[in-house]
Amino acid sequence: QGQPIALLTTANIRRTVKNKLAEQQEKTKRADLKSITAKIYYKVCVCKFRLAITHYDAVKRLFAKNYNDYITLVWPWYVTVNVNDKIPFFTVTKKPALKDAEKILGPFPTQKSAAGFVNVLEDVYKLCRKREHVNNGRSCPYMQMDACVGVCAGKISTDDYKKIIEQAFDAGAEPEKAIENFQTEMQKAAKELQFEKAAALKKRIDKLAALKKPAYKWT
């Protein structure tokens, strides 16, 4: 009769359809979907966040009067950084402050994917990770391992560090462009026989390439 029967989300549509439309071997309280299903409509979504939005839109169209009974909204995650802070840090949050100097990346489907995104930026750009060392001038293991530029210990100025933060944010927003810039630097270093520098840039390129994984796609 052209009416919706069920609205489902699944990672494997073939398996789900097979299970739902299987012939019932014995009588149960469950509806015999095979006998009443005429058509199946589906849409492919690239990530959990996009899936949640698509599911929400479909529920509102199909069950307009009582759509709230059919959904549980998923709150996305964001990565924020305030460039006006004395020493800016990337932060994972569900609720950006929306301040004038706050920059936002996202949304991300899960807290884990947002945190992984930040870890990549911290590794590539050697960002400060220990907030507790900001005001005491102490060095941390990351700086001792040359995995941090050392703004907390005064190795570089806060103004220079904020420029690095800007570069890291831009890389998060457009990883392909950042990778191209690193590739240009790497090729130049190789031509000048600066092989150690070229190798270091290659490592940064490989790490930054991780940002193109499906887990970080929010549109």
Image (tube, grey):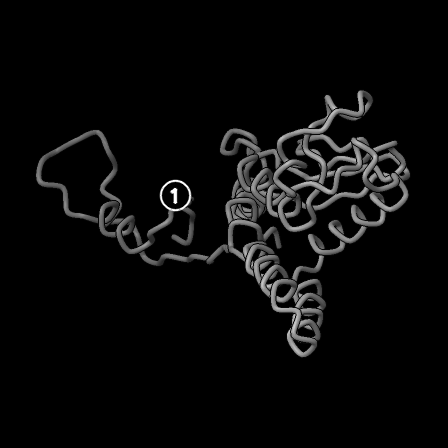
x and y percent of residue 42 in the render? 43, 57
Of residues 73 and 5, the one drawn nearer to the viewer in this rendering: 73
Say if 178 sits above or below 157 in the image. below
Say if 93 sits above or below 209 in the image. above
Counting other residues with Cα less than 10 Å from the Cα at mark 1, is it few (<14), some (14-19), or many (20 or more)? few
What residue is shown at x 59% (from left), y 38% (from top)? 115
Q: Residue furthest left?
A: 25
Name the residue type under label 1.
Ala
Of residues 107 and 9, the one drawn nearer to the viewer in this rendering: 107
What residue is shown at x 69% (from left), y 28% (from top)? 130
Residue 54 vs residue 40: left or right?
A: right
What residue is shown at x 66% (from left), y 47% (from top)? 121
What residue is shown at x 70% (from left), y 75% (from top)? 188
Q: Quadrant of the C terminus?
A: bottom right
Of residues 42 and 83, the one drawn nearer to the viewer in this rendering: 83
Please name the residue that numbered disc 1 is placed on.
6
In terms of image quadrants, where is residue 32? Answer: top left
